[in-house]
Amino acid sequence: MGRLVHTASPYLYPCTIEYSLICTVILYALWSNVCGNSQMLRHNSAYGNKSPKPVTGYTSQHFTVDCANSNKGLFASILVLVLTIISLIMFLVLIKEKDYRTMAKFQVNLWELILYILCTTATLIATYRIRKLKYDSSRHIELDTALLVMAQIGLYVYFIFSLLAGYLTKEMVKKPNIFIISLFALIQSSIQTLFIVDAWWRRCSTLETARSKPGRQLVTFLLLSNIAMWAINHLENARPDFHPIELQFYGIWTWTIVTHISMPLAVFYRFHSTVCLCEIWKTAYKYKH
């Protein structure tokens, strides 16, 4: 049992940070509600957007989800998720073999780069398409914006340190994958954050946009793709041998401090992005007469 706990602890450590951040959000929402600001609770966070209703007896409720114009994005994102799982399994199997360790790291890095390129392209196209929806300035996302920006700071710190290590060492010429992956990760996360902040205020205002639901396929794709990137970031945090260049450049203690501070926030960024994209997927395409 002790060996199992020791092996699983690197994978579970970021989850404790995520749990603490989510508890902070929920407690803040409860505090806002206790203070009587129910409007803030209803709109301030994706984790606390349900307003309480009086209970007057047994009532049967029907829960329906409109999945129109999302099937292609769903199938594409499921394919991405399956390929990510295959890549992670191959890494965990091949890394044990001395002759295949380089191949194990290379295939994960290659798939991670492809994933960043796909998500960057999808985000740019979704940003263009979702501009057809009306901008609704009545919504408030102060808490969600703060969480997203705070988590992205951790992601910036992690990948900027990796980018500098890849650029300032001789490995930049031999193995440019670290520099390129870090660069694309920074670009993808920045564009995605801008898209989420903009899309949060968008609403269907006409029957045409309610039927066509512009950008919803891509929002669905990004939703599950962020889960795939969340899994990859978990792997990167849990495996010290995944960062030999950073360990050599910064030293064991410095890089350990950097990863323990920044990587849990980077992992939480993917989780919170999934929550925000799910909220956009549910609310942005509802048409109210």
Image (spheres, rainbow, N blue to C red):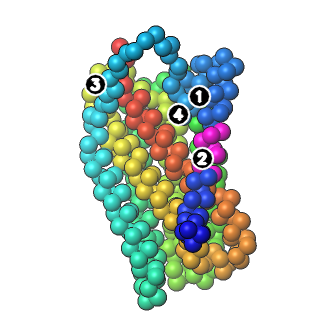
Q: Which residue position holds label 2?
A: 19
Q: Is residue 122 left or right of residue 48?
A: left
Marks 3 and 1, Cα distance to the nearest angstrom?
A: 29 Å
Marks 1 and 2, Cα distance to the nearest angstrom?
A: 19 Å
Identify the mark nearer the N-term, 1 or 2: 2
> Given this view, does label 4 or label 3 mark the residue nearer the observer?
4
Identify the mark nearer the N-term, 2 or 4: 2
Q: Which residue position holds label 1?
A: 44
Which residue is at a point 59% across and 69% down the rendered structure image?
2
Majority secondary structure in the magenta region: helix
Which residue is at a point 64% across and 27% down the rendered structure image?
30
Image quadrant occupied by the N terminus = bottom right
| Mark 1 vs 4: CB contact within 8 A | no
> Given this view, does label 1 or label 2 mark the residue nearer the observer?
2
> Percent from the top left, x then y, of residue 18?
59, 49
Q: In this picture, which residue range is highlighted in magenta?
A: 17-24
Which residue is at a point 62% across and 52% down the rendered structure image?
16
